Amino acid sequence: MVDISFIIPVHNSAKTLERCIHSVFFNPTNKTYEIIAVDDFSSDNSFEVLNELKGHKPNNCIFETIRLEENVGVQKTRFVGLEKSQGKYVYFLDSDDEIVPEFIEKTINKMEDEKLDVLLINCDVIEEKKTSTLIAKSSFDHVRTYGAYLESLLFGDFGFTSTHVYKSTVFDHVKINELPKLSFTEDLNLYIEIVSKTDLFVGILNENLYKYYMAKNWHKSKMNVSNANDSLYVINKRYEIVKSSYSDKMNVFRRGNLKACLRLIHSVKKTKNIARKEKKLLLQQIRNAEVVQVVTNLSISEFFNLQLKDKIRYILYI
């Protein structure tokens, strides 16, 4: 039996693949694991690098490489790997990141001991020479207070595939083919769909077991019209669920999503990927969205409670 499947979407990642794959190879464990690396029609030699690395796999590793005949995006690429996976547990690993040496033993033992369906973990964020922790302690406290589903709606702090280890059976309850084809914030959308199943057991392991390499000004460099609309879609989806089913938590949602709305507007404002005229229309569309108006309609006391960076963004952009 395969204990855990690492599904790795690959697109023009030849320079980082060795670091990524070796981080799995060098996890000291007797457990059986598989790597399913899906090359999303790369234009570099990523697929050749994958096949070369496959020849150095440990004995307890199953390594499968798949080459797609067209570029389909990261979400669909992950799902191609998911369909091929055999592991009891599933982890989506990005090809430019890595896991720490204790990952396999710590995550599987925790999930086995507590019979979990989803395990929430933490990550190091490495941006140039600076290292920080991705998820604040307060976010784990939110999970303990509200539960995993409400946390995903009210705050969305665990909107990264890197923070979730899944039992493979949870995907039996998600209609993957019916999910919207998002290219941005698709991680959070999938997580919401999964943890909306009330019979799932979600556990917490607040340890940094993943190294997430973030490019400088990542949000601005990735931002375009499509990605902005994807971000707004997921924020609005969460808002509509809270409004219809958890209206008593609306003030918590407002506080929990102000930063996300301000960051979205800031990223659109600063990106160079959108023409000026189109950017003006997009910013107007975002600001006019009901969820953004609700979240950014602050009282004087709420404004003064903001962090300095958010105060500045609020004054400049709202």
Image (cartoon, rainbow, N blue to C red):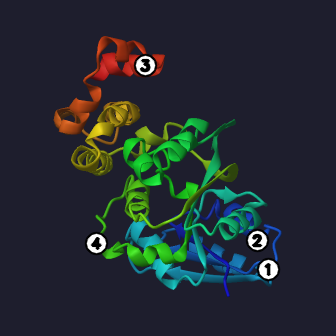
Q: Is residue 248 shown to the viewer in this render?
A: yes
**Residue under numbered circle 2:** 25
Q: CA distance from mark 1 to mark 4?
A: 37 Å
Q: Can the viewer see residue 40?
A: no
Front residue (pair 61, 194): 194
The secondary element bearing badge 1 is classed as loop
Residue at numbered disc 1? 58
Q: Amino acid at mark 2?
A: Phe
Tell me residue 117's x, y (percent): 55, 68
Q: Alpha-carbon neighbours of circle 3 within 10 Å: few (<14), some, or many (≥20)?
A: some
Image coordinates of residue 195 in percent, x first then y, are 43, 61
Establish if 181 lies above or below 234.
below
Residue shown at 23% from the left, 31% from the top: 294
Q: Amino acid at mark 3?
A: Leu
Sequence-first disc among 1 and 4: 1
**Kind of element beneath mark 4:** helix
Count of numbered circles in the view:
4
Q: Specify the quadrant of the image occupied by residue 107.
A: bottom right
Q: Considering only order in the chain, which callout, 1 or 2, is on the residue closer to the N terminus? A: 2
- Spatial CA span between label 1 and label 3: 50 Å
Q: Which residue is mark 4?
A: 178
Rendered location of residue 41, percent (x, y): 45, 73
Task: Say whether residue 280 is left or right of residue 212.
Answer: left
Do the residues under discs 2 and 1 have CB atoms within 8 angstroms? yes
